[in-house]
Image: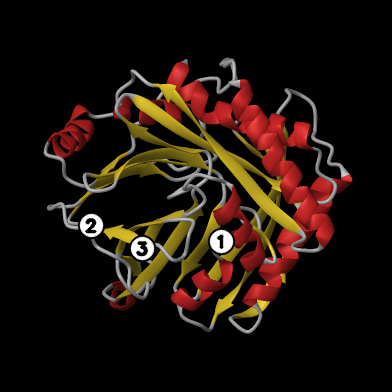
Amino acid sequence: MTATFFEKIEDQLSKKLPFVVYRKPRASDLIAILQEDDQLHQISDYTETGFLFAPFDTNGPSYFFKPDTVLRDNTVLHKESGQNKTDLNFHIVAKTLHLALVEKGISEIKKGTFDKVVLSRNLEVECSKQPLELFQSLISKYDSALRYLWYHPKIGMWSGATPEILLRIENNRFTTMSLAGTQRFIEDIDPTWDTKEIEEQKLVTQYIFEALKGKIIDLQVSETESVRAGMLWHLRTKLSGIMQNGLAEIIKALHPTPAVCGLPKEAAKNFILQNENYNRDFYTGFLGELNFKTDTARSSNRRNIENRAYKSVKVSTELFVNLRCMQLTDQKAIIYVGGGITKDSHPEKEWEETVAKSKTMLNIVLD
């Protein structure tokens, strides 16, 4: 990795100017977007171009960085093992509170308030590492995720490694996914899924399908598959088709997805906002490239000189759900974790799932 690439980011940070540096899943390019001033740019209708950062609560503002300067670097870092080595003694109060929250969620499901709710918590740990050092560790460990470091002096600094795509668009070609179910990765052992996890995945997929009806033409649903993200397994189903509505309407239909909120969406969201007793902020929001434009040649035939003179513009958007993330502040890291609760959930297992998920970031902060 060239020194110049990170020197420019360090300089941006020293000047307290906004930036984001990221690498997409299994990609070679590192990308940095540097904004020339500290202005906060809010999204109005998703026709803007820039790097988007949006919160969980749709009533809050979403922001984007203008791509005043775009840097790229494709140096490959040595890949670390990614094994979970970090053990942290969790405070008994944190566990007691989360178990009570899960039990309350299950009780509301049995009453018929909603079918599923995603409940989360956060934990705060000391962090002596520099932000770009943390980011380089993310790059090395989690190749199948979007790894990012995002900073704005008026908001703060966030970092993460998320495997979940909210949506991907190239011109009018649309793709999204449902991602649910979680279990630990064990070397040489394929995952097996219980009824709770399979049903949860079906609920998420069906909701997304219904939400996109009339907005996506020729909507196709793939077979469900097991995918690995770091030291965890998930269930994933892809949905794809052709856009016939504006991006703002599609995002409104999708976010927050059942994988981070619940079903029905409004009832689950209200329960989360009233009972989690902390502000998720950008955790379980979404982030990524919004309306990026690239020129592509119409013909790759070397003999077709006339057509080679013409180019077409491809407009693409690629947004990820902000999972496996942390907020960095005052030599501390605030790590966010959660899990989907259904009628078949067991509070102790749900707690253990959040512990497993927390290690994605803990391995970066404490190792």
Kindly report the distance in space between the C-alpha atoms of the residues bearing marks 1 and 3: 14 Å
The disc labelled 3 sits on which kind of residue? Pro
C-alpha gap between disc 2 and disc 1: 26 Å
Q: Which residue is mark 3?
A: 61
Q: Which mark is residue 256?
A: 1
Which mark is on residue 67?
2
The answer to which quarter of the image holds residue 60 is bottom left
Does residue 227 show up? no
Give whichever of discs 2 and 1 has the lower sequence position: 2
Q: Residues within 10 Å of mark 1 (few under 14, many from 20)?
A: many
Nearer to us in this view, 275 or 24:
275
Marked residue nearer the N-terminal end (1 or 3): 3
Q: Residue at x 64, y 46 (%)?
A: 119
Q: Nearer the viewer, mark 3 or mark 2?
A: 3
Residue at x-position 59% and y-position 43%: 120
Indicate the amino acid at tag 1.
Pro
> Where does the image place residue 49, in percent across and percent down from the top left?
29, 66
At mark 2, the secondary structure is loop
The answer to whether residue 334 is seen in the rendering is yes
* On-image quarter of the N terminus: top left
Q: Earlier in the sequence, mark 3 or mark 2?
A: 3
Amino acid beneath label 2: Pro
